[in-house]
Image (spheres, grey):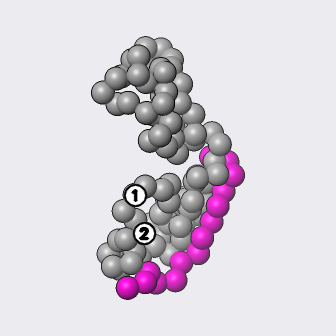
Amino acid sequence: MKPPAFAYHRPETTAEALALLGEFGEDGRVLAGGQSLVPMMNFRLAQPDHLVDINRVAELSHLRRGNGEIVVGATVRQAALERSREVREDVPLLS
C-alpha cells in the first residue's frame, strides 16, 4: 500500500519547525529518519496531513559534552554516536 496524500515541509530552523507544528497541530507529524512513521503511513495506520522533515535543522544535529552529561540532538545519526570519543568515554554502552 501507499500512503494517502500529504504536504511535505522542510524547515531550516527550529523556530520554523515549531511554527509549522504549531500551525498544523494534530494534523502534523515530525519526520526525522530511522523511524516507523513511513511504514505506518503505508499501512494507513498513521495518516498525517503534513510531514515536517527536521533533517535540515542544523540546531538539532549537535552532539556535545556538558555539565556532566552527553547532549544528543534529535537528528544525530547512530554512526555519529558510535564514532564519538565523548560518548565512548562517558557512556560506552551507548557507543
Residue in view at x 43 percent, y 33 percent: 82
Indicate the position of residue 15 as horizontal and vertical percent values.
65, 48
The secondary structure type at the circle numbered 2 is helix
Camera-nearest residue between 39 and 53: 39
Q: Which residue is mark 1?
A: 35
Q: Is residue 18 magenta?
A: no
Q: Is any atom of residue 74 visible in this view?
A: no
Q: Name the residue at the right extreme.
A: 12
Query: How much space separates mark 2 and mark 1, taking CA atoms?
Result: 8 Å
Q: Is residue 13 magenta?
A: yes
Tell me the crowding category of disc 1: few under 14, some 14 to 19, or many 20 or more residues within 10 angstroms, Cα based.
Answer: few
Quadrant assignment for the N terminus = bottom left
Q: Is any atom of residue 77 visible in this view?
A: yes
Q: Is residue 70 above or below residue 77?
A: above
Residue in view at x 57 percent, y 53 percent: 54
The secondary structure type at the circle numbered 1 is loop
Q: How many marks?
A: 2
Query: Magenta stretch mostly in which secondary structure?
Result: loop
Indicate the position of residue 87 as horizontal and vertical percent values.
43, 24
Q: Which mark is residue 86?
A: none
Q: Which residue is mark 2?
A: 38
Residue in view at x 58 percent, y 39 percent: 61
Name which quarter of the figure residue 39 lies in: bottom left
Q: Is residue 81 above or below residue 22?
A: above
Q: Are marks 2 and 1 in contact (CB under 8 Å)?
A: yes
| Region of the chain picked out in magenta, as a range | 1-14
Quadrant assignment for the C terminus = top left
Residue in view at x 39 percent, y 17 percent: 90
Camera-nearest residue between 52 and 91: 91
Horizontal side of 60 relative to 77 (left or right) equals: right
Q: Amino acid at mark 1?
A: Gln
